[in-house]
Amino acid sequence: MARNYVTEGKTLTLIAPRTVAAGAGMLVGAIFAVALADAAVGRPVEARRVEVFDLAKATGEAWTQGQLVYWDNTNFRVTTSASGNTMIGAATQAQASADAVGRVLLTGRVG
């Protein structure tokens, strides 16, 4: 293995941009991840950048399986609206417009 290898990068220690609960999505610069523990603003927290999570979803939007989804960093939820938001992955299943939670495959894409 290369001597400069550090980690896979699936889980990172990030500084919480706001008070977050375990399971909450958060955007730190260009990195989107899901907090694995509760953390106060400005404190380090382990966060996962990839895999599948159930996350807060914008109601009023129906999702189709495989649809690209974005992080709304104002309302702290996932949306299908690209405008002003950060792409984080894709819906792994259809979601009804009334659903408050959506299942998302995080791609680990930065920016």
Image: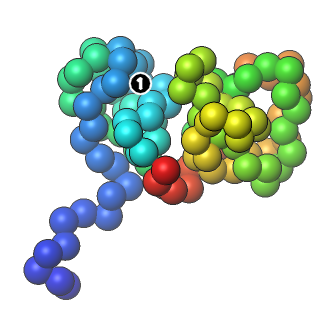
- Place of residue 46 in the rendered image (x, y in percent of width and height, measured from the top left): 29, 37
Residue situated in front as seen by the camera: 103 or 97 = 97
Quadrant of the frame with the N terminus: bottom left
- The extreme front residue here reads 84
In percent of the image, x 78 and y 54: which residue is there?
A: 66
Q: Quadrant of residue 71?
A: top right
Residue situated in front as seen by the camera: 28 or 83 = 83
Q: Residues within 10 Å of mark 1 (few under 14, many from 20)?
A: some
Please name the residue that numbered disc 1 is placed on: 22
- Place of residue 57 in the rendered image (x, y in percent of width and height, measured from the top left): 70, 26
Residue 104 position (above or below residue 75): below
Describe residue 88's horizontal placement relative to residue 2 as left or right. Answer: right
Q: Quadrant of residue 13?
A: top left
Describe residue 91's horizontal placement relative to residue 51 as left or right. Answer: right
Q: Indicate the amino acid at tag 1.
A: Ala
Q: Quadrant of residue 45?
A: top left
Describe residue 94's horizontal placement relative to residue 102 as left or right. Answer: right
- The extreme bottom residue here reads 1
Badge 1 element? loop
In percent of the image, x 88 and y 32: which residue is there?
A: 62
- Work out whether residue 102 can be spotted: no
